[in-house]
Image (tube, rainbow, N blue to C red):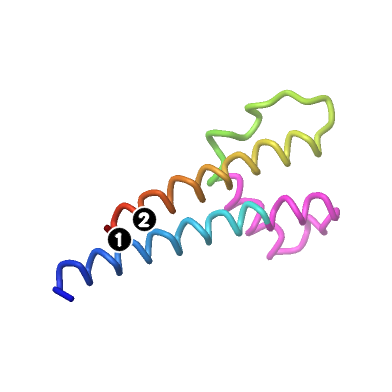
Amino acid sequence: MSSRSRSANQAGTIIAIVADIMALILGLWILMYLLDANQGNDFVQLIHDTARWLAGWSYDLFTFDRQWARVVAGYGLAAVVYLFVGHAIANRAHR
């Protein structure tokens, strides 16, 4: 295996891992919101702030009447897009 293809494989793996971590944070916030996690907790606040930043483009994209539906749709869409795009780029780098 040439060093160029090894570098491409490593880059693809890193991209996939970053996409997975981003989706994990978004999914974790959705779960914390649905389970009514303590908003005063520093870890919960860190996850919320990070998820809000990651989903800045999709948050409040949908205007459901229920807040929980907005959270699931807005943050869930961002998680799915990050997974899809991240893994598509990673697969492209592996070729």
> What SS does tag 1 mark?
helix
Locate residue 5: give its quadrant: bottom left
Using the numbered discs, state the Cα–Cα distance from disc 2 to disc 1 in whole angstroms: 5 Å
Type of the residue with mark 2: Asn
The residue shown at (30%, 63%) is 11
Count of all numbered marks drawn on residues in the image? 2
For the N terminus, the quadrant is: bottom left
Look at the picture and state if 68 lies above or below 12.
above
Where is residue 59 drawn, in percent x and y? Answer: 62, 34
Q: Does residue 34 show up magenta in the picture?
A: yes
Residue nearest the observer in this picture, 6 or 30: 6
Give the main secondary structure of the magenta stretch: helix
Residue nearest the observer in this picture, 77 or 33: 77
The residue shown at (69%, 58%) is 28
Q: Which mark is residue 68?
A: none
Q: Does residue 42 show up magenta in the picture?
A: yes
Type of the residue with mark 1: His
Look at the picture and state if 93 lies above or below 69.
below
Look at the picture and state if 57 lies above or below 9.
above
Residue nearest the observer in this picture, 54 or 93: 93
Locate residue 76: give its quadrant: top right
The residue shown at (66%, 54%) is 27
In this picture, residue 1 sits left or right of residue 22: left
**Residues shaded magenta:** 28-52
Mark 2, Cα crowd under 10 Å, few <14 / some 14-19 / many 20+, is some
Q: Which mark is residue 94?
A: 1
Residue that carries the numbered disc 2 in the rendered image: 91
In this picture, residue 24 sits left or right of residue 2: right
